[in-house]
Amino acid sequence: MQILAGAAMNPTTRKRLSSLALQACFAAAVWLLSSGLPLRAQSCTVLIDSTLNFGDVDPASNNPTDYVGTLTVDCKNLHDQYVRACVNFGLVTGSWTLRTMKQGTNSLNFNFYQDAARTYLWTSTSDPSRMTFIADIYNPGGSAIRTYSIYGRIPGGQKPNLGTYSSTFTTNEGTVQVAEFNSTYGPPTCTSSTPPINSRFSFTVVANVGTSCSVSATNIDFGQQGVLSAAVNATGVITTTCGTGTTYSLALSAGSGVGATVGARRMTRSGGNETLAYGLYVDAGRTQPWGDGSSGSSTVAGIGNASAQTNTVYAKLPPQSAAIGTYADTIIVTVTF
């Protein structure tokens, strides 16, 4: 007699992520760069998105979280052919190549970029590399308005703690320099000199690291058996990945067998309605049924660390009479967080 028996576990995830509306306020004025030209009666306004919203960050993901904003340069009553705007994002915490948002002593890395591929940083004239944003605008009619993109990125794989992270750019970090020029004089240089107080702006960058979990499971295979005169043991593995500090619990369903409960599961013969009794347990001694907390069963709890955590499922097929055939059952694994 041959009996093939197994139980498949299908993972499901219940997900709760909080959303965060990020608000940042900007006020920008202009500073005339020294370009060798006399000052003109001109009006230039630099506007940046009032909201830089990275939104929710999955703490267990290796993928980056991106943001795209806009910057607008609006100039009127210009006398020369071009205007150059140098927009600087200074440094609050971290480094020029890896800025940080803070939640107490915890950090979340991010940065600004000038290109969609996010390879060219957007920094300041205070940065030795001087990777400030430069907009040279042609204005044949004496006025011009242009809009540019700001590309933000939070790298994945950081494993941050849950909560809200922020970085406030005060008027010491946000500066705008604007100057007119023409083909005779050429564009001015974005200097590292300190701009006057009325050409500075402030803003806040915020992101929310919410709770997140994923779960997967291996099948349990009791193998090929003859007469079931002795108990047969097997094991499976449930792998859970949750954000750092996320509390979670793992529950197993009763399965698809007719009349099955979390304390008395049933595998069903393929092509028939005969069943085999078996059990799934929390402990290696196979005394405490692993279920959903009902009928004397237990669930398994954990605290996420943004890495894969494993739990062993202990299975037992007791001695019993059975018709020849292949038996199987499907168990649903649910992670609640």
Image: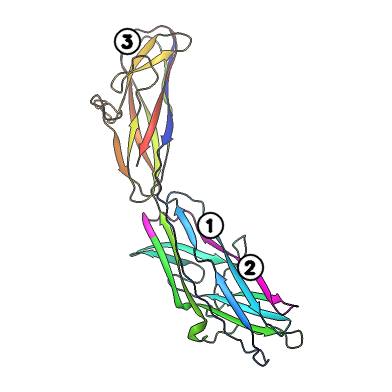
Q: Earlier in the sequence, mark 1 or mark 3?
A: 1
Residue 16, image quadrant: top left
Mark closer to the observer (2, 1): 2
Q: Quadrant of the C terminus?
A: top left
Kindly identify which numbered label has been placed on residue 147.
2
Kindly identify which numbered label has been placed on residue 66.
1
Instruction: Please state which amino acid type lies under the numbered disc 3.
Output: Gln
Instruction: Please state which amino acid type lies under the numbered disc 1.
Output: Asp
Residue 151: % across, % down: 57, 63
List the residue tagged with mark 3: 320
Answer whether residue 20 is visible to the viewer in this image: yes
Residue 277, image quadrant: top left
Instruction: Please state which amino acid type lies under the numbered disc 2.
Output: Thr
Q: Is residue 184 above or below residue 329?
A: below
Q: Secondary structure at mark 3?
A: loop
Q: Earlier in the sequence, mark 2 or mark 1?
A: 1
Q: Give me the C-alpha separation between circle 2 and circle 3.
A: 76 Å
